[in-house]
Image: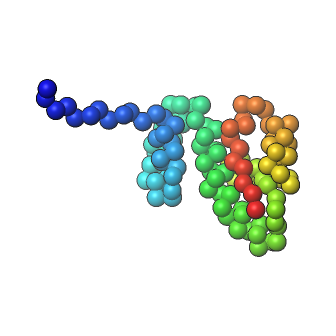
Amino acid sequence: MPFKKPKKKEQSPKDKLDFYMKNAKNREYYECEIEELIDANPSLEGRYYWHWGRIISRDRKKWMKKLGIKNKHFAIVSDTVIAQGDSEKQVKEVVKAMLPKDKWEWVFYFSI
């Protein structure tokens, strides 16, 4: 039997977006592809905002630590902190009461 080169597994749109949003270099290099991917797959909009929450939360955490904030949990959508509480469970309950269900996947949770 002749050797067959394995077929490359086609990346899903979600996997492509995750790769494009992985770091600043990728985000800059694939800026147009990101826009095209989201335009072609509107269901990825939530994942896109989740990534921005993940990215921006790093700076928010640094700033909050400088302010002396400790032992708190937060929810962020894109660049906006939308909820805080003493536990992740508490924050998730606030988010579920605040946002429509179709926006829950947009939320990135973090703690200090």
How many marks the image carries: the answer is 0
Left-right relation of 35 to 112: left
Q: Residue at x 82, y 62 (%)?
A: 71
Left-right relation of 41 to 94: left
Measuring from the top left, give residue 65's x and y in whole percent.
Answer: 76, 69
Q: Residue at x 85, y 46 (%)?
A: 90
Measuring from the top left, give residue 62's x and y in whole percent.
Answer: 70, 68
Classify 101 as above or below 58.
above
Residue 18 shows up from this direction: yes
Q: Residue at x 44, y 49 (%)?
A: 30
Residue with the most extreme left position: 2
Residue 59, picture quadrant: bottom right
Classify 112 as above or below 99.
below
Measuring from the top left, give residue 75's x and y in whole percent.
Answer: 76, 49
Residue 70, picture quadrant: bottom right
Residue 98 shows up from this direction: no
The N terminus, quarter of image: top left
Left-right relation of 79 to 51: right
Q: Residue at x 60, y 40 (%)?
A: 47
Residue with the most extreme top position: 1
